[in-house]
Amino acid sequence: MKTLSEAPTVHPTARITDCRLGRWTEVMADVTMREVTFGDYSYIVRGGNVIWTTIGKFCSIAEGARINPGNHATWRAAQHHFTYRAGQFGLGEDDDGFFDWRRDHWVTIGHDMWIGHGVTILPGVTIGTGAVVGAGAVVAKDVAPYTVVGGVPARQIKCRFTEEQAEGLIEIAWWDWSHDELRVALARPSVPPSTRLAGAVAGCALVQVDPRSVLRNSPASVAANNVSASRAEMAMSIRRAEAGPTTAQLRPPSRLVWSMPVRAKKAPAHRHGSLPSHENRRGHQPRLKAVSRSARHPVSR
C-alpha cells in the first residue's frame, strides 16, 4: 500500500518550478507545474500541466488536466509567439509585458475539488469549493461551489447539495481541520444515530475540540441540515454511507424527482385511406399506466 508523508511526494519525472507544495501532497509522473500554490492533501495525476494557479486543499486532479494554458496575442496582426518570444528566432528581445499579462489571468481553485480526466481550465477562471468538473470539459467561466459542470464549453449539470447544505459545509470548513482532528473523525466506529452525538463529543474531547456547534451562528443551516454539535460528527457524516439522519443530511432532497411526463402516443400516420389502429378505431384513447410518486427515481442518491 502506498503511504504518503507530511513532506510532498514528487515523482522523479515531474517538473516543478517556483511552486509551493503543501503537506501530504502528491505530484505524479510527467506532471509540469510552474508558479503554483498546491494545498495540503491535494494530488495531481500523470501528465497534468499547471501554471499560474492557486489550488486549495484536498483537490483531486485526474490524468491529463491542463490548467491555465497560455493565450496567444489574438489582437495582433501576427498571433504566432515569435512576436513575444523574439529572442528564440534572433529577432530581438522578448516581450516581457506580454508574459505579465498572462500571469495576471490567474486561475483559482477552491478546496475539495474534483477535476476529471483531460479537463482544460482556461485563464482567469475561478472554481468554487466542492465543485466537480467532468472529464474532457473545457471551463471558460467561473464555477460555483458544490456544482457539477461538464461539456465544451462547460455548463452546470446539477448541484451536489442544497444551498443551505453547501453553506453549512463551507462554514465548518473541514479542510482546515488539523491532522489529528481528521484522524479522530475517520477512526470512529459506526454507531446508532441515538448515540452518535455523545460519541462524537467524546471523540472531540480527545483532541480538545470545541464540542459546541460550529454552525450555531447560522440557524438556517442548522434547521436545514439538522447538523450535530461537533466537527467529528460532520466529518463522519461526509465519510460514512450508512442510513440515518446524519447521512441523509448530505443527500439531495427527496423532493427533487425527475420523471418524464406520461403522454398518450399519437396514432400512426395512415396511408392510402387505411383504417386507424384497432385501439383508436372505436374512439378509444390509449390507456396510460399510472405512475406513483414512490416509483419515480430521484436525481441522485
Image (cartoon, helix red, strand yellow):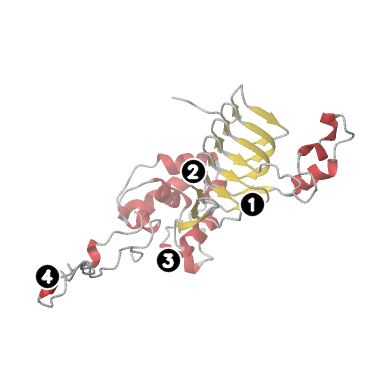
Residue that mark 2 sits on: 135
Tell me the amino acid under the disc marked 3: Ala
User: x and y percent of residue 142 in the render?
Assistant: 60, 56
Cβ atoms at labels 3 and 1 below 8 Å apart: no
- Which comes sooner in the sequence, label 1 or label 4? 1
User: x and y percent of residue 135 in the render?
Assistant: 49, 43
Q: Tag 2's secondary structure? A: loop
User: x and y percent of residue 112 in the render?
Assistant: 53, 46
Q: Nearer the viewer, mark 3 or mark 1?
A: 1
Residue sitting at x 62%, y 42%:
67
- Which comes sooner in the sequence, label 2 or label 4? 2
Which of the image's four quarters has the N terminus? top left
- Which comes sooner in the sequence, label 4 or label 3? 3
Q: Nearer the viewer, residue 19 or 78?
A: 78
The answer for how far apart the CA atoms under marks 4 and 3 are is 50 Å
Find residue 224 and name its label.
3
Q: Residue furthest front?
A: 272
- Which comes sooner in the sequence, label 1 or label 2? 1
Residue sitting at x 32%, y 52%:
195
Name which quarter of the figure residue 41 lies in. top right
- Which comes sooner in the sequence, label 2 or label 3? 2
User: x and y percent of residue 269 in the render?
Assistant: 23, 67
Answer yes or no: is residue 213 visible: no
Residue that mark 1 sits on: 125
Q: Tag 4's secondary structure? A: helix
Residue that mark 4 sits on: 279
